[in-house]
Amino acid sequence: MTSMLTSTSSNSPHAGNAFLSIEQIVKTYSKPNGDRFAVLNGIDMTIGQQEYVSVIGHSGCGKSTLMRIIAGLEKPTSGLVTLEGKVIRKPGAERMMVFQGYALLPWLTVRENIRMAVDEVFKTMSRNDRIAIVNEHIDMVKLVAAADKYPHELSGGMKQRVGLARALATRPKMLLLDEPFGALDALTRPKLQQDVLEIWGQNPQAVMMITHDIDEAIFMSDRVVMMTNGPAATIGQVLDIPLPRPRNRRELSESKDYYDLRNEALDFLERYQ
Amino acid sequence: MVLMSLGSRARAVFVRFLKGLLKPNILLPIAGFTGVIALWWTIALFRHEMMPTPLEALTKNLDVILHPFYRRGIGDLGIGWLLIESLRRVCIGFLLGAMVAIPVGIWIGLSHNAWLALNPIIQVFKPVSPLVWLPIALAIFNSAEPSAIFVIFITSLWPTIINTAEGVNNVPKDYLEVAQILEMPRWKQLLKVVLPASLPYIFTGLRISMGIAWLVIVAVEMLTGGVGIGFFVWDEWNRLNVSSVFLAVFVIGLTGLILDYALAQLQSLVTHRSTRS
């Protein structure tokens, strides 16, 4: 039942020195009639300390469930996730999440939303230091002009910048991005992708990003993990993206390597149509 | 020359004023009120023994309208004093009700067991006219004043409890997950996420409660007597002074409108979001 599908990556989940390690994760739900219903059926993967990994798959393949297990918001039925060797059992600020729907508190301004996270995570820090962190991250995501606005006064792209700033401001060990660009329009998306890459490039850290956009996954990631269709999804194939950084969308669009990778991913996803 | 230009400017201002009146959002409400008064006038003309015409009602009430705060001996108070007395009862009962209803609403919104236990009670008591509580209150307190407040208190409970519970239930899951990821303790999640997120619902409940409380106080005061706008209505009717009852209709209506508007303003102040009142 747990036969592992071939993976092009040679990373063994039991290498021991992985930063984040996901081992044999199975997640089942019980249906109202008592039957068990498997969403994830034996997921093994690792993420390095400075690695940007995307997980891609069709809707309903359980990729969001996988991320929620890593975030600690859901418990796996069996298997375990470890971060720096410590087993993840509950949510924690070391694994900050960026939500597809932004999840900004509408009664707080941009500044207050970020401030709330910083206050909660750095309780022992002095007030001035906390304010400095908030300001630094408002600047980082280019929201200085909108810092005292409420979320409903912002565009989708700006809201997600706040979500990102809130996540980064708590200085997490790893970032979980749950379809962070999914709700954005086609003109806003590339700009924010570029900005996220630039921020990450200045301070690379472990990132796991859920997406269903092949171009986005290849453009941003070091590795793309492609999942088979649910129910009982597993990892179908892992694609290494050896494209040099910093990446430029226009240069990539002229590169043959990029198209080879893109075709490989497309072939995989079409097989599981 | 100067006079002429003054005259033309005055005329320009007057014309602008008239044009302002012609805007549909001003013109139509005026037309609506005019229609009601016209209807009243027509009925009063044909059945004059039944009610006074609007003009008669106005002239008879002119003294009361112009001197709302007179004191002419014991029990002979201006309508402003009566209004204040009624408002005081409503506010005390309403505030006590809110102090109980909001925590209970939060509790049953959070705990499914509490909801299972309390929801049937609420569903049974909610359709009971608050006036039914008046005899019970009189039996308990043996006095009109606390009984009136108690009835308002009961009235204010149900809509606020139900709406608060609804609001707590509808707090977006994302907000709570953010709080969990930040490792907020449970009490802090309640205070910093659940409560502010349900405030719009809580205010909806408070506004419904306030509306019903204002309806009920008039009836309670009619029954219990004492100083208040409800007793004023009953007293004037007993003196066959229907003109004053018509005055009371407008006073009660306008006060209710102002109360709701005040709560709506408080809501947009507290939630930082504009509300349509």
Image (cartoon, rainbow, N blue to C red):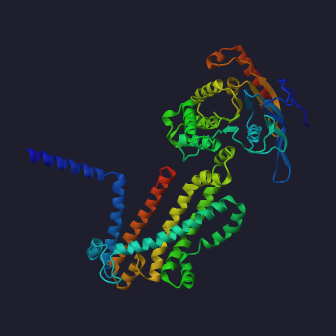
Along the viewing direction, whichever of B191 and B63 lies nearer the viewer:
B191
Q: Residue at x 47, y 60 (%)?
A: B263
Where is residue B99 shown, x and y percent of the image? 56, 66
Place of residue A93 in the rendered image (x, y in percent of width and height, measured from the top left) = 69, 40
Q: Residue at the spot x=50%, y=77% of the render?
A: B148
Q: Is residue A44 left or right of residue B83?
A: right
Task: Count up the numbered dots.
Answer: 0
Q: Quadrant of residue A170?
A: top right
Q: Quadrant of residue B75?
A: bottom left
**Whole-percent x, y for residue A53 in the image:** 73, 28
Q: Is residue B9 visible?
A: yes
- Residue that sits furthest to the left in the current view: B1
Is B31 above or below relative to B212? above
Seen in the picture, residue A131 relative to B233 is either above or below; the reply is above
At 53% across and 37% down in the image, what residue appears? Answer: A155
Q: Work out whether A67 lies above or below B81.
A: above
Q: Is residue A45 left or right of residue B11?
A: right
Location of residue B88 in the rendering, given as x and y in whole percent from the top left corner: 44, 71
One can see residue B56 in this view:
no
Q: Picture quarter containing residue A213?
A: top right
Is residue A261 shown left or right of residue B196? right
Quarter placement of the N terminus of chain A: top right
Query: Which quadrant holds the C terminus of chain A?
Result: top right
